[in-house]
Image: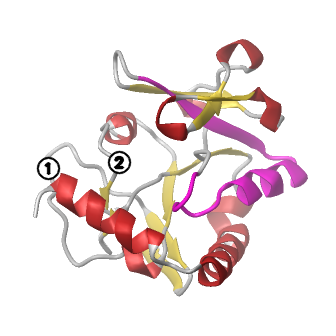
Amino acid sequence: MGKKELRNLQLQILKSIDHIAFQQKCFQIEQLLFQSPEWKNSTTIAVTISKLPEINTWNIIKRGWEEGKTVVVPKCFPENRELVFYELLDFHQLEPSYFDLYEPAPDKSAVVHNDAIELMIVPGLAYTEKGYRLGFGGGYYDRLLSSYPGLTMSLAFVEQMVDTLPIESFDIPVGTILTEKGRIDCGS
């Protein structure tokens, strides 16, 4: 099965999780994140703005603000397939972009250099226990992670954990995955 078919299959699996189970799973993963040493020891955290059926990151952003952390969110620049992170101080800094995503408005936000980010929460659709991930297809994170010096983590429902994925030479595994069932240290 190719990556496109795998993406479609994973999206269908995620969409099939009922609302109550989805909320409970998100809560359990959030609690694991907030208790993790990576979260506790990081002052600048990168996270995407989620949309269904992804794990809800809006609460994670709010918790970061409550704890006085610097929360940064990415904006995609498709012309060079680059992600640029901006500090998010207020949800009003967000604007709708392509694919029904919300991204920071550059005129309302300050750029934060990747070297200043201590923990990057990396999105994806499927993961292996070795930390390899099936992303959404743009290759943005693999480009970024190839030179990113900080900690990487993904948040996933157990339904997103798979035995194998097609892995390419440029794929960069994440260091840790948190699911509602616990922590997976990927050894990268």
Q: Earlier in the sequence, mark 1 or mark 2?
A: 2
Residue at 58%, 45% in the rendered image: 48
Quadrant of the image containing the N terminus: bottom left
Which segment is the magenta one? Answer: 51-77
Q: Say left or right for 19 vs 176.
A: right
Residue at 30%, 38% in the rendered image: 139
Query: Which numbered marker is on residue 168?
Result: 1
Image coords of residue 56 (percent x, y): 64, 61
Q: Are marks 1 and 2 in contact (CB under 8 Å)?
A: no
Circle 2 is placed at which residue position? 136
Spot the residue most to the bottom: 181
Figure check: 118 above or below 67: above
Does residue 24 show up?
yes
Spot the residue most to the left: 1
Does residue 186 show up?
no
Q: Residues within 10 Å of mark 2 (few under 14, many from 20)?
A: some
Quarter of the image holding residue 85?
Answer: top right
| Dot in front, 1 or 2 | 2
Image coords of residue 39 (percent x, y): 68, 60
Residue at 34%, 17% in the rendered image: 80
Q: What amino acid is at disc 2?
A: Phe
User: Which secondary structure lies at badge 2?
Assistant: loop
Quarter of the image holding residue 159?
Answer: bottom left
Q: Residues within 10 Å of mark 1 (few under 14, many from 20)?
A: few
Residue at 83%, 35% in the rendered image: 90
Residue sitting nearer the eye, 170 or 94: 94
Image coords of residue 74 (percent x, y): 56, 34
- Total of numbered circles in the picture? 2
Image coords of residue 25 (percent x, y): 61, 79
